[in-house]
Image (tube, rainbow, N blue to C red):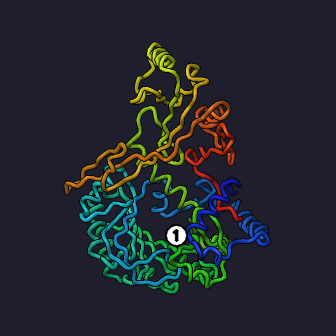
Amino acid sequence: MTTNPCGQHTLLIEANRSEYGESYARIPFINPTSCSALNEQRLLLLDSLSSRIEVGCGGTKFDMGDLAPGCRACVAGDWSCLFVNGRCNARCFYCPTSQEETGLPTTNAVSFRAPADYVAYLEQLGFRGLSLSGGEPLLTPGRSLAFLGAAKRHFGDRLHTWLYTNGIMVDENVLCRLRDVGLDEIRFDIGAVGYSLEKLRMAVGIIPTVTVEIPAVPEDFELTSQKMNEMAEIGVGYLNLHQLRLTPYNLERFLARPYTFLHGEKVTVLESELTALALIRHSFDAGLGLPVNYCSFVYKHRYQKAAARRRSAIFMRKPYETVTSAGYLRTLAVVAEDSRLADIQGRFKDRGIDPALWSLSPNGQRLLLAPELVVSIYCRGLKLFASYAECLIREHASCRHQFKEFRLPSGRKIVVERWLAQEFALYGDAREAFVSRYLHHGIYHQGDLLSDETDRPVGVETYECIVEGLQDYY
């Protein structure tokens, strides 16, 4: 169920401590006394659902059996989220950031003034799903309609579109305008309006798919259960539940509630996850026929980020490089004396091996090789280096790394640039273990760390694989 190696716990705790500084001591994290009981509670919930639901994305997403169309695009890694503005007219206690500035429409740290530029960005990078978010995108309706309409005119049914809203600005006229420019799905955060379903009733029958997307708030379990019955009756298509996440911005509001907090990539609320799982069970027990999806924080943090990295990496990959499951661009190289490297290249040429699968580094000291050549007899016993690059979409190149440019209709350029994330020198047993696990079979043994010459853990698996399972309780 959970897979964080024990050695990672200390690193995560220290990262959480650093993020919250002096406030860290005020956060009621799970304690050893309650940990066992709460783990057991989660196990019982999962057991009660095991024969009813489809679990996917490495055990981080429940229920995969019937996902909203936008969620399917997200799981496939084909989704771009455009933050139309940074301003909101609701004051949800769980909001993770300040929402006070309109700003420019932004995605992936790239801003867009012109809808045509954003459409070109979607086309050139191969997206097939687009969401409009904020802030509250209906606070700038002209902007939202312009970007949505431009995308749908260009892509038509090739692009699934959805919009997130708190519903405050929604009326029949707004809904019809959104429908007329091609909106496929609308997602309401009813937690922002006291769980009112008034605007959902209005949207059903106008927008093709109506989805509710809210955090699972523990103290609202009974109310949410009641509203789920009503959602099913009025024709809501899907319910998506998120896990509450603590941030420095919402810290004081969260500390005023009786929550238990979890260490992790970010600090999350334990009871929120238990609530989400219990609400999925309620949907089945009550026979609602309302698909409920728990979108855990670890799914968002691990799978969405890996999908973004993979999408960028394919534009920078050379024939001898590999895009790993975690989305990093892996480059393998062997190091030896010049004569040995020359001998290996000669053998490759004699065997007619495609020269695109190997290359001598510019300094002549490393032979860069495709994985299938690393495992060949000619390269055995040599020192192996595995380097991992993260490829990032940026408005401007730093000019310190390799990059690829994309020209937009306005004449602007955006770039995908590769940045070295980590390099590992693999010797002896560590080299052979790496070759066996990742090159021969690609098998990931959870928590199975490689070691370097000083027997210190080497986190190759961080760059090779996505950690599976829900967040550990510790």
Can you give x and y, in whole percent of width and height, for residue 35 in the image? 76, 68
Residue at left offset 49%, top offset 46%: 328
SS at mark 1? strand
Image quadrant where one finds the C terminus: bottom right
Can you give x and y, in whole percent of width and height, for residue 471 in the image? 65, 62
Amino acid type of the residue tagged 1 in the rendering: Tyr
Q: Within the image, what quadrant is residue 150 found in? A: bottom left
Query: Which is nearer the eye, 424 or 253?
Result: 424
Q: Answer with left or right where residue 55 lies relative to residue 93.
A: right
Q: Answer with left or right where residue 305 lies relative to residue 409.
A: right
> Which residue is outermost to the top?
350
Q: Within the image, what quadrant is residue 266 found in? A: bottom right
Q: Taking 253 as reference, is 137 above or below it?
A: above
Residue at left offset 23%, top offset 55%: 412
Can you give x and y, in whole percent of width and height, for residue 440 in the image? 61, 32
Query: Which is nearer the eye, 446 or 214?
Result: 446
User: How many numbered circles are shown?
Assistant: 1
Residue at left offset 38%, top offset 79%: 100
Can you give x and y, in whole percent of width and height, for residue 453 in the image? 66, 36
